Image: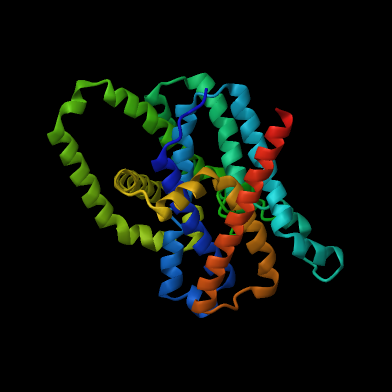
Amino acid sequence: MEVKRSRTSDFIKGVALVAMVQFVLVEYFAKPEIFTGLAGKISMFLGGAPAAPVFLTVMGYYLAVGKKSLRAMMIRGFSLIALGFLLNILRNAVLLWHIFQGLSNQNPWDLILGTDILILAGASAVVMALLIKVLKGHVLAYLALIILFLLLQYIVPPVEKTFPTSHLAPFIYGKYPHALFPFIPWFAYVLAGYAFYLFKQFFVADSFKHNQTVKIVLLVLSGLLLLLTLPFGFNVSIKPIFFFHHGILFFLFCVNFVFWWLLLARAIVNRVNNPVTQYLEYLGKNVTVFYVMFMVLAGNLLQSMQKTMDYPELVLWFLGLMLLSSLLVKLWEKAGKGKQNSNS
C-alpha cells in the first residue's frame, strides 16, 4: 500500500534534521567555553525535544498509517539495524584505521557496537510489527503499554553497575554515559505516535469532535502546560545523561511539545511554500540518507577538529556540511533512479 506523502511530516522531519545537525556540530567541534556556555545550552535544547522525539513519534504514526505487512516491517527494521552498525564503522573509519595502525589503544568494539538512533528505529519497527499483530487496533492497549513501558525504568535495577562493560545492555536499558537512545525509554515515543493515530481515528468517528468549546479548552490547557514546563524541559535537555535516560515527566513534556510543534508546522506548511520550506521538506523525504551522509562526514572530521571551532567557523562548517550532505543525497537519488531505469 502506497501512503501519500505528508508535507507537514516531511517539513518537521527536515527541521528536526537541521536541529540535530547543529547540535552535533556544536558538541563535536565547538570550543569548550562555547559548548558549556549559553549558546551550547540553547544548541542542546534545540537538539533535544525538537529532534529525536519528533522523529520517533512521527515514525510511530506512519507505521499506523502505512499498514504494512509483518514481513515488510520486519525487513525494514532489520535493514535499519544493519545500517546503524554500518554507519558506526563508516563514521569512525579514521579512528578505526588509527587503531589498526597501533596509533590508538581504544577498543574498536566500543565504536562498532555503539548505540545510534538508526538502531533504535530498526528495533522499534521490529517490535512494533509484532505488537501490531497481537494488539491489533486497540488504542487502550497501546496507552497501557506506554505507561507500563515508562514504569520499567523505575522497576528494573541499574544494570550499568552490574554490567559496566556490556555492549548489549546500552541498546536496551541503563544509564550508561556513552549510551544514546536506549530502547527504554525511547520506544515509548514510537508507541505514542502509533497510539495517537488510533486515538485520532476513534476521535474523528465520535460526535464529540464537533464540540469546538471542548477543543479550545483542551488546546489552551495544553498550551499553558507547555509554557509552564519549558524551564523543566530546557534543564533536562542540557544534561545529556538526563536527556538520553529521562523519565515519565520529560516524556510527557516532549509529547506535549511535539503536539504543539505539529500544529505549528501544519499551519506553516498550509500558508508557506518557498525555497526554504521546500528544502526542509526535501530533507524530510530523505532523512535517513542525509543523516548517514552527514554523520560519516562529521564523525571522521572529529579526529582532527575536535573542540577547536569558534562561532564563525561553526557557522561556515554548518553551511558547508549541510550543502555537501545535500549534494551527496542528490547523487544517491540519481544513482537510485539510474539503477531503476536500467532494470526497467
Q: Nearer the viewer, residue 247 or 120?
A: 120
Q: Quadrant of the C terminus?
A: top right
Q: Is residue 29 above or below residue 128?
A: below
**Residue 167 makes an appearance in the image:** no
Provide residue 256's location: percent of width, then percent of height: 32, 46
Q: Residue at x 49, y 38 (%)?
A: 59
Provide residue 118's location: percent of width, then percent of height: 60, 45
Q: Residue at x 23, y 49 (%)?
A: 223
Q: Is residue 319 above or below residue 226?
A: below
Q: Residue at x 56, y 27 (%)?
A: 129
**Residue 288 makes an appearance in the image:** yes
Marker count (numbered):
0
Name, please, the residue furthest toward the left. Answer: 213
Provide residue 189's location: percent of width, then percent of height: 45, 41
Provide residue 4's location: percent of width, then percent of height: 45, 30
User: Which picture quadrant has residue 97?
Assistant: bottom right
User: Which picture quadrant has residue 221?
Assistant: top left
Q: Is residue 223 left or right of residue 283?
A: left
Q: Nearer the viewer, residue 162 or 69?
A: 69
**Which scheme is used to colour this image of the protein?**
rainbow
